[in-house]
Image (tube, grey):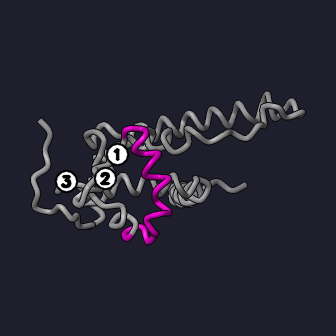
Amino acid sequence: MPASNGAETEQDAEALLRGLAAWLPRRFLLAIDIMLDVAFNGASGPLPAAELGQRQGLETRKLEAILQRLSRAGLLKSVRGPNGGYLLGSERGSITVGAIARAMMGQDKPTPFTESPSPTMRKVVLPMVERVHELVLAEFDRVSLTELCRLSRLAGLASKCDGIVDFVI
């Protein structure tokens, strides 16, 4: 096998990351995007589910399960009434992608591979996958909504809240 140069390795890494997003549950990716939307556009007040759905290109009813999970986990606050909608449950710097992942995947039942008759599945494959899972969650824990908002600005995205001063004392 020929040695690869740095550019090929970087391209391989980028392809792998694009591939990883394809492996992650769609509702998890939507949850990250919804949380980013609320963090990025919600400084002026609650964002209605219909507005969030419009930016996602989805009907509100398709977002309800995601919004409920995020609210139950304390990541979002639901505000009722004519000017209601969703706000962050806490300061955006304290909410990580790891917390979003745990909220979205916490109630799912795992695949019962632990009952597999295959000893290699139980003793080699599953422990390896669990180690990778822990590493991915650790990386997700390093990324806060503040960082995602910063990246949104660097990507040239405009916020609904441009011009509003946002600070925490």
Return the disc, 3 or 1, that comes first in the chain's sequence.
Answer: 3
Task: Identify the magenta region.
Answer: 54-74
Q: Is residue 17 left or right of residue 50?
A: right
Proximity of marks 1 and 2: CB atoms separated by less than 8 Å? yes
Which SS type dominates the magenta stretch?
helix
Residue 136 at x, y = what percent?
53, 40
In terms of depth relative to the viewer, which is nearer, 158 or 19? Answer: 158
Q: In the image, is 23 to the left or to the right of 152?
A: right
Kindly give the residue lying farthest to the front in the view shown: 81
- The label shown at residue 86 is 2
- Residue type at mark 1? Leu
Q: Residues within 10 Å of mark 2 (few under 14, many from 20)?
A: many
Between the residue at mark 2 and the residue at mark 3, the CA separation in whole angstroms equals 11 Å
The image shows residue 127, relative to residue 10, as above or below, that is above
Residue 102 at least partly seen: yes
Instruction: Determine which residue is flagged by label 1.
Output: 76
Secondary structure of the residue carrying tag 1 is strand
Residue at 30% across, 37% down: 94
Callout 3, which amino acid? Ala
Vertical relation: 33 (above or below) 89:
below
Residue 34, numbered label: none
Question: What residue is shown at x 42% (from left), y 44% (from top)?
Answer: 97
Q: Which residue is mark 3?
A: 43
- Front residue (pair 64, 75): 64
Circle 3 packing at 10 Å, graded few (<14), some (14-19), many (20+), is some
Disc 1 to disc 2, C-alpha distance: 6 Å
Q: Quadrant of the C terminus?
A: top left
- Magenta stretch containing residue 15, yes or no? no
- Looking at the picture, tell me which residue is in the foreground, 96 or 90: 90
